[in-house]
Amino acid sequence: MRLGFPAKVLGRGGVLKDYDSRRWQSGPHLRVSLGYLNTIFDYLTEERIRMYRISSNVAPYITHPDKPQFHNQIEECAEELAHLGERARRLDLRLSMHPNHYTVLNSPVERVYAGAVRDLVFHGRFMDALGLGPEAVAVVHGGGVFGDKRAATERFVERYERLPEQARRRLVLENDEKSYNVPDVCEIHRRCGIPLVLDTLHHRANNPERLSNREAARAVIPTWPKGVRPKIHYSSARREDRSITRRDRDTGERVTSEAAALRFQHADLVDADEFTAFFADAGPLVFDVMVEAKRKDLAMLQLRADLRARGIVTE
DNA sequence: CGATGTCAAGGAATC
DNA sequence: GATTCCTTGACATCG
């Protein structure tokens, strides 16, 4: 089992940048992002981290319909991409990406659909230019419901199947906290074979059928093709402590009680006891874990240390 | 320097 | 059909 983290690095004093985030007026470029990634790879090497999510903003404006001057960044960086990809292979680094929520493959709006295809093709081309293996995937959500979930599901399946090979090969589907829960993504998998990612926090938030983590893991993890290790997204819920003051009905006295409210936001760190229970529950299944926590790499490193203390050694 | 507005991009709820 | 929220961060601008 590998542990990874997404995008930004907090663990080197300040923050290591992960992509060129300047506005278009300042001429941001993939080349700059790749420079940042090289620095991040130094960090991954030092910390012996072997799984990492590259920001989907890595190539600024590359699919922007009105900004053709940004459309050739992959070609312009062919050499740098090959070099960085070579480095990833040498480090035995599992890379992945996560297109943002504006990428809606099943949208009934033609323009939005077209934009989603452009974006997913970019993700495929980018990972191909790095020369990454099939373990490197782009993780998306099911998209919107648009008042008719069956029809929206159908559109997702059709459009997945019609995606250019370069994009489809890399695409995997994750359960989300609002629209497409574990049974929903399992249905989509049955229809078109897309591999699935289990997000444990989303599963907590959107689980009307009350599937246990064990059941969810057993449904989702085996959807990956032979030879490619599945992965999951793991995070703990933010625990927000707030005091509640009310007036006692009989005495009229003010009574303050502490209530710990669970909210479905990412906590700063991962609760190692919870994770250990999940890991035991998932039984003999083998998978990698993307740690999604506010404290990013620091949370991942903390979890790794906590697990080691419990006798669970990660790669 | 700190506060505030803005960013390419969607969906859904509300009116 | 238009408005607002969702929700995230960081750039960019203004005072």
Image (cartoon, coloured by chain):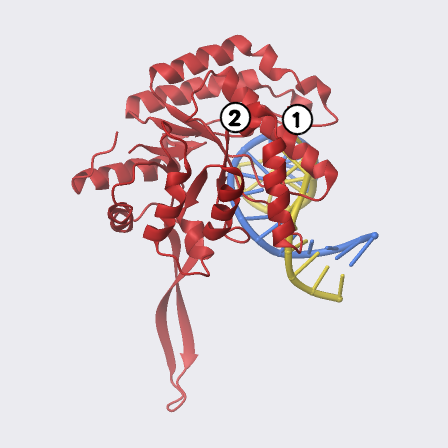
Chain colours: A red, B yellow, C blue
**Three-letter code for the amino acid on which mark 2 is drawn:** Tyr
> Who's the residue at 64% across and 43% down the image?
A155
Q: Is residue A131 visible?
A: yes
Look at the image and tell me in which quarter the N terminus of chain A lies: top left
> Percent position (x, y) of residue A242?
40, 64
The image quarter in which residue A13 lies: top left
Mark toward the start of the polypeptide (1 vs 2): 2
Query: Which residue carries the number 2 mark?
Result: A19
Asked if the residue at tag 2 contacts the one at tag 1, i.e. Cβ–Cβ closer than 8 Å, the answer is no
**Three-letter code for the amino acid on which mark 1 is drawn:** Thr
> Who's the residue at 32% across and 51% down the image?
A214
Chain ID, mark 2: A
> Percent position (x, y) of residue A126?
54, 21
Query: Which residue carries the number 1 mark?
Result: A63
The image quarter in which residue A27 lies: top right
The image quarter in which residue A199 lies: top left
